[in-house]
Amino acid sequence: MRPARSTRRARTWAAAAGIALLAGSLAACGGDSEDTTSAGDDVSASAAGDELATAMKALDAYPVPTEKLDRIGSVAGKTIFYVPLTKQAPQFTTTEKALAVAAEAAGLRLQVCDGKGTPTDIGGCIGQATDAKAAAIIADAIPYALAANGFDAAQKAGVPVVLSNQVPDPAHPASKTLAWVPVPGSEQQIRLFDWIASDSKGKANILVNQSSDGPSPTRYVADGKAALKKSCPGCKLTINKVTSSNFALVPSSTSAVLLKEPAINYVDAQFEQYLQPTQGGVQQTSRTDIKVVTGSASLGGLKALKSGSLTAVTAQAAAFQGWVNTDAALRLILGQPMPEYNIPTRLFTKDNIDDVELTEKAELSGEWFGPVTFTDDFKKLWGTA
């Protein structure tokens, strides 16, 4: 694996102990808030130091694996399924488009099935792929426990599964038929909190609209909270749980918390899919002093930052992830060893957004995060260049 710019970029998040699907994780959101306060007044000097500066820079090179694939020609004409948790998330659209290009480069066909944020639809997609005798299933942001029967049945039927955008579940370790592609959800949350700590000079009162779609988003915020206690002991954090299965309640639950806690001056929509309803909730309060940030941003989020309606965003290299997911699927199909994958992230603010080309072409090329040569690098690994 070629190293990233710093060890921060190469961090792999360990599996959470005793991970389990949260009860009602895809139930209606609203009215479920958690308030956490830490002591102290001064922001740590490290909060706005080298970590933030590094987080705002593009990589010198993408962390493309170095282990070559053999017998790639044997997969020609086979079909892989891509099942995102919900196509409401713009990031998944970018990954899907990159997957289509990567699959074609590998001689594969791509079938997409929208999980729509519900266990029924997700299970239906996985069952469809299994019945179709797919070469592999790539599930994006879907907790194993949410579709355990389907994932188990697929592997039993000889259909390997790649789980992306999830914290690895120790109850279902990687195997010859199951691969985990960890993503930097915690990394993004920590960098947003670091930026808020710096921007507020250690006096931020933050509301996070945290996704309750499974255990991984909770883990990301928990890691961010732990870092916040160190970087900003004078900051306060309030958590409002939301879900992709019921966007209609996000504005009202957001405004309710803001009215209850008028000292809140930063609002964080954990993922961009929650950004619009979160901003709607802020607008309902008629407050103009609140700064809004978001994670897992796409082109829309970066444009909002440019226009001034957002103050900071983090994003992960969703196009690169499409190629990584394809590489992982190929290795499962061919029975070859799985490398360690790392998905780059970047923090965007008013200080670096003017250096970014805000077009769909630029987003799909991956140039926001580093050199665009990674597609050729993967083709060379696969022997298709």
Image: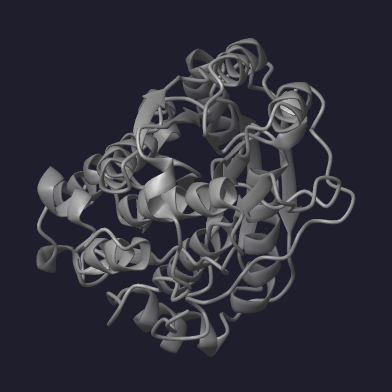
User: Could you say where residue 103 lies in the image, as x and y percent from the top left?
Assistant: 33, 42
Seen at 63% across and 45% down, the residue is 217
User: Could you say where residue 295 lies in the image, as x and y percent from the top left?
Assistant: 43, 50
- Asked if 19 appears above or below 108 in the picture, the reply is below
- Asked if 25 appears above or below 379 in the picture, the reply is above
User: Could you say where residue 291 lies in the image, as x and y percent from the top left?
Assistant: 37, 50
Seen at 67% across and 21% down, the residue is 26
Observer-nearest of 103 and 35: 103
How many numbered discs, if any?
0
Seen at 35% across and 65% down, the residue is 347
Observer-nearest of 262 and 184: 184
Residue 295 in view, yes or no: no
Observer-nearest of 320 and 286: 320
The C terminus lies in quadrant = bottom left
Q: Is residue 325 left or right of residue 283?
A: right
Seen at 56% across and 80% down, the residue is 43
Q: Is residue 68 left or right of residue 127?
A: left
Q: Where is residue 183, by image quadrant?
A: bottom right
